[in-house]
Amino acid sequence: MAGARRKLIVVSNRGPVSFSRDESGQRIVRRGGGGLVTALRSLVAHHDVTWIASAMTDEDRVVAVEAGDEAIEEVARDGSSYRLRLVAVDPNTFHRFYNVVANPTLWFLQHYLFDLANASIVEPELVRAWDEGYVPVNAAFAEAVLAELDAEEDATVFFHDYHLYLAPRLVRERRPGAALAHFVHIPWPQPDYWHVLPERMRVAVHDGLLANDLVGLHTARWRDSFMHSCAEIIGAQREAEEALYRDRRTLVVARPISVDPAEFDELAEDPAVLERQRELREGRPERLLVRVDRTDPSKNVLRGFRAFELYLERHPEAHERVGMLALLDPSRQDISEYAEHLAAIERAADAINDRFLRGGWKPIDLRVEDDFPSSVAAYKEYDVILVNAIFDGLNLVAKESALVNERDGVLILSENAGAHEELGPWSISINPFDVDAQAEAIHQAFEMPPGERAARLEALRAQVRANDLGEWVAALLGDLDRLAAPA
Amino acid sequence: MAGARRKLIVVSNRGPVSFSRDESGQRIVRRGGGGLVTALRSLVAHHDVTWIASAMTDEDRVVAVEAGDEAIEEVARDGSSYRLRLVAVDPNTFHRFYNVVANPTLWFLQHYLFDLANASIVEPELVRAWDEGYVPVNAAFAEAVLAELDAEEDATVFFHDYHLYLAPRLVRERRPGAALAHFVHIPWPQPDYWHVLPERMRVAVHDGLLANDLVGLHTARWRDSFMHSCAEIIGAQREAEEALYRDRRTLVVARPISVDPAEFDELAEDPAVLERQRELREGRPERLLVRVDRTDPSKNVLRGFRAFELYLERHPEAHERVGMLALLDPSRQDISEYAEHLAAIERAADAINDRFLRGGWKPIDLRVEDDFPSSVAAYKEYDVILVNAIFDGLNLVAKESALVNERDGVLILSENAGAHEELGPWSISINPFDVDAQAEAIHQAFEMPPGERAARLEALRAQVRANDLGEWVAALLGDLDRLAAPA
């Protein structure tokens, strides 16, 4: 994965660290989590990286001001150094960008989450948030990139995700020769669904992305949808792996992200994880169904509960023997849709528990907390793990859990999770809208003969180890090399 | 439009007549409405037609039993005779077919109306309704078609719409050489959205349709989506206008349906219409915004009200001068989604009226009734007509209203209505999800200079008169001729 050392300008909304102050007023640096940040940290170890990210906390803003529009030197957990440049905008602008456009609009759209019959979608608030939030934040990111390119004009710029669809065009207009790449970590919906946005917005999204030389998505399915919507919405031509638009070519690739197996080998033996695992074992039912997710509507927690309810309805023999552990990290609770969704999840679990509760047996153990050691402990202990996302760019839970499981656990996997392209053959595939079939899948998973369980888990693991995070990085750097090669 | 007289077996869920009993116990025949039935009636005048339809009323069932599985002779309004064969199944089976599968599932799916984040979609009830409703009703229709083909083996079978997706395959299996055509009158969604259905159902829909020699849809957009989902879901190959699948070719065409201008010329002078028009004129505001729809969620009444509210908010000068007349035909009220939707419409109108009500001025005049003469009167009287459907196969209101309007009225038209492919150039296009832009469109329409209003309406009319219902029938019969021609 190493290859030649490169100059990379990594650009993402969330950065690798965030700053705050402790009680004594001392500045604290917290190295953030999240799949994307974890994945990109591996770039820092091998390349000359400048990372541009949003100043998200108050203290981030102070750091940005102190830096005076310059990058600061930072050191990663493994000791590698990199440069960090924080982009600060005023909190109202950031709110419009993040809490109106990026999450409840673009994220919802790209996961097909809108209630098209009823939801408020393009209200005046969104139009304003686009013009006074999404556009200026993207412009500020573009300015930061341009400043870094002034210093290092042969660096490759590597944008990430749905927060930054407009920045590449703004950079391209001023640096026609720059090497620009963009990775979209979430699904790409088909063009009809993009019609939810006003024409100028849907055009700007596609026009912005095709200002890059390289666009990456996780799967062939999302790549094909992207090509299709570029054709339909901005008239781009597809030619094999390339989109032709405004006299430029953009290479569009499918590169499924992955995890670092060594990290999970270590985590499996981490004292905090072992402690949680002991606790889990003491209280566990005979057979354990696990789900680990953020409380995002795309994760489909409610239909998962409903499927478990149907399973219990149909299989009285499972009562008091089977339990579901739902570990849910509360997500984006400052957005009303997300807060309402979490409340609905809690009500649904209560209703099912009220219905079936008997003796010491509570069918659903719902824990709403951000506790990664508990998640890894649950990965080790599940007999069946349910990943039933409505749509999901990839879904790392499906990969992480297989690496550390100790019980020949079975994966039930949504056909709309990006990971399904890789892991489908060794999982039980389900349609996330079909609670009837999900109930049957739970039964089938628990009843699977031991030999088959072991063989499937073994194959899943082999797949994840062979296509690990290093492979993902190497593949994308290889794509960049193809671009750099003379045409 | 006439051409050679043909033997046609027309197959649709709703037939051209329905039977009931009056108070004295006498059988009454009611010639039904609905765009599809009206459109197909013109076939009866020129061809040798056997019409196969569901027995929907109790008396329909009595007629079906009396007929003893034979067609009966009927006479159309214009005096032409045709044969009618009613397909009777027991009411539970019909309920599952119609009120569980066809409307709240297939109609919702094809109009993108599901709340994918939350709605109950594939529950055990749907699975049962498919197996014990949709499948047996389609089988019963297929049996009726086969019986008619026994009598007239060279007849062309012409299926209609989403109720009958499985019947063509059942007929094809027993009559490999039969001439089968199918017209889909509603939108075709892109393949991701078909994934809402369990695989066996989505496959059966596409497999059933490609058992036809000809499939028609209203627009190039729906045709392309159909081709795309046939490729993605059942692996059909596209070759120009044909889909290749299971060693057969299906010609797939875009043929926008239309209206009969002569019928509307007459209606405009109909005494009932003139009476309603007089009443309308007496009470009308200075400027009248009209919408005429069924109370179907696809019609987007709530966002239309919200746009009008925003318009009033932004234009106090319009208060007491502008009014909205919403004529809504209550639709499918025995389906809970539809009943709830109508209640929401009534609440929304009340809330806006409460907000702006002053003097004698009530901004929204909501009339929930099935009264076609009132609709035609409103078509004559509008200054602006709003057709903002979320998605719509075609939308005949856009065509009908232009034919009879007397005030150089302006059409505001959803870019997701099939009619937009034909009428877009002379309407004000709107995104149905964008209430901000719809409010601006209402303003723009009222402010349009008289000359431009007149010119646009004139062009709309010319388009509708040139591409009338007769043209639609002729085009489809021409397509059948192409099939009959040696390859």
Image (cartoon, coloured by chain):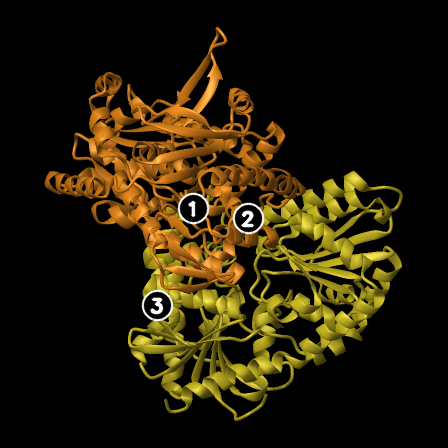
Chain colours: A yellow, B orange
Asked whether A91 or B20 is in front, the reply is: B20
Residue with the mark numbered 1: B182
Point out residue A437 in the picture as x, y percentages from the top left corner.
Answer: 68, 51
Residue with the mark numbered 3: A207
Point out residue B98 in the picture as x, y percentages from the top left corner.
Answer: 54, 35
The residue most toward the top is B24
* Residue A406 falls left or right of residue A56: right
Q: Is residue B122 above or below residue A10?
A: above
Residue A175: quadrant of the picture: bottom left
| Element assignment for label 2 | helix
Q: Chain of mark 1?
A: B
Label 2: few (<14), some (14–19) or many (≥20) C-alpha neighbours in 10 Å: few
Point out residue A265 in the picture as x, y percentages from the top left corner.
Answer: 75, 78
In space, the residues marked 3 and 1 are separated at their CA atoms by 39 Å
Q: Is residue A11 above or below residue B283?
A: below
Residue with the mark numbered 2: B174
Which amino acid type is shown beneath numbered disc 3?
Answer: Asp
In space, the residues marked 3 and 2 are separated at their CA atoms by 52 Å
Check the picture and name the quadrant holding the C terminus of chain B. bottom left
Label 1: few (<14), some (14–19) or many (≥20) C-alpha neighbours in 10 Å: many
Asked whether A48 or B134 is in front, the reply is: B134
Marks 3,1: beta carbons within 8 A: no
Asked whether B121 or B268 is in front, the reply is: B268
| Element assignment for label 3 | helix
Residue B101 visible? The answer is: yes
Asked whether A342 or A384 is in front, the reply is: A384
2 or 1: mark nearer the eye = 2
